[in-house]
Image (spheres, rainbow, N blue to C red):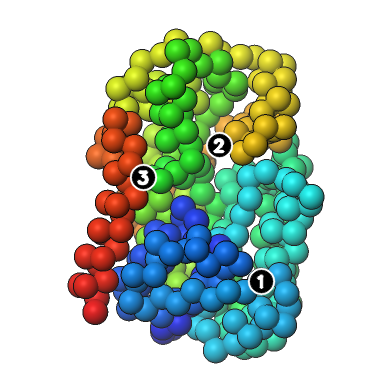
Amino acid sequence: MNINKVLLIGGSGFLGTSVAEQLVANGVAVTLPTRRTLRAKHLWVLPTLQTVDADVNHPDRLAELICGQDAVINLAGVLHDSNGDFERVHVALPKLIAETCVATGTTRLIQMSALNASIDGPSAYLQSRYRGESAVLEVARRHPMLNVTVFRPSIIFGEHDKFLNMLATLARFSPFIPLGSPEARFQPVWVEDVAHAIMQSLAQRETFGQTYSLAGPREITLRALLEFAMSTSGHRRLILPLGFALSMAQAAVFERLPGQLITRDNVRSMSVPNISREPFPSLFGKPHAMEAIVPGYMQASKPDTAGPARYDRFRQRARHLS
């Protein structure tokens, strides 16, 4: 199966940026729709990527975008539910994308979900993720021409993530850290490993109809993650662990603040271990450990270097591919 043209939905964010880079590096022409074009300006240097001003929730516009594509990758997702965002982004949009693929004759779809996605999951986030992937798979069941692969990653780390970097920032500016859900367990996976799995799966027929859990090689608690972030960034701070009730109370305050650092639904998500019973699929190689990756980019003493460094890397890659 040849994949030369891909529509990348949700492609201007953290994971989408890495996926876009890997697609372009492999000679794929990428169309990236966004309602805020400037959010994708860091990708403009990629030679075979085109950003398009579009609302993918509009059926007719989505059909125009998907028509003629070899594959669609849907990475759209939100962590906080505001005005029905979970239902709109995680459930309605994936179903619309799958149905539009069928209507336009596009036969390949990659759907991003989440580890622990379940109809009876402890949080609205996990439930909505499950309903979204189920809707996509149901469309594929009714229309066998649609080849779907679902990915369920654990928490994703990388140079511009909003998790490890957030923990390091807290340590940088706060003399002590009240930590909710300190014993929550994760199996962090590197963003480039996730992007590689998505890229590799596109044309591999053995991945059709499959759901893959993507988790790194190490299980770790939230407290240990914070200690790792502090050690790596060079800022040691006192940790004040909070039980479930205080974690929920803390989240109730934070979710009302700008940026919504954490919500009560996030706390509910963390009440079940975010780990995989299955190893990282050998089909996509071996996952990298945090200890081998994070020290190379986490330099809290140089907060303004990440942006220019990434632009330089894009320019170098663009010159190489031109």
Q: Position of residue 59 (x, y in %)?
A: 73, 78
Q: Position of residue 186 (x, y in %)?
A: 50, 34
Q: Which of the marked residues, 3 or 2, is nearer the chain's N terminus?
A: 3
Q: Is residue 313 left or right of residue 241?
A: left
Question: Which label sits in the foreground, 3 or 1?
Answer: 1
Marks 3 and 2 sit apart, C-alpha to C-alpha, by 21 Å
Residue under pointer 3: 159
Question: Which label sits in the foreground, 1 or 2?
Answer: 1
Q: Is residue 63 left or right of residue 46?
A: right
Q: Position of residue 135 (x, y in %)?
A: 73, 64
Q: Quadrant of the N terminus?
A: bottom left
Residue under pointer 1: 55
Q: Position of residue 35 (x, y in %)?
A: 61, 67
User: What's the residue at 53%, 67% (across, down)?
Assistant: 37
Q: What amino acid type should be assigned to the residue bearing mark 3?
A: Glu
User: What's the residue at 69%, 86% (across, down)?
Assistant: 103
Can residue 259 be seen at all in this image of the molecule? yes
- Cβ–Cβ below 8 Å for labels 1 and 2? no
Q: Which of the marked residues, 1 or 2, is nearer the chain's N terminus?
A: 1
Q: Secondary structure at mark 1?
A: loop
Marks 1 and 2 sit apart, C-alpha to C-alpha, by 32 Å
Residue under pointer 2: 274
Q: What amino acid type should be assigned to the residue bearing mark 1?
A: Asp
Crowding at dot 2, Cα within 10 Å, few <14 / some 14-19 / many 20+, comes out as many
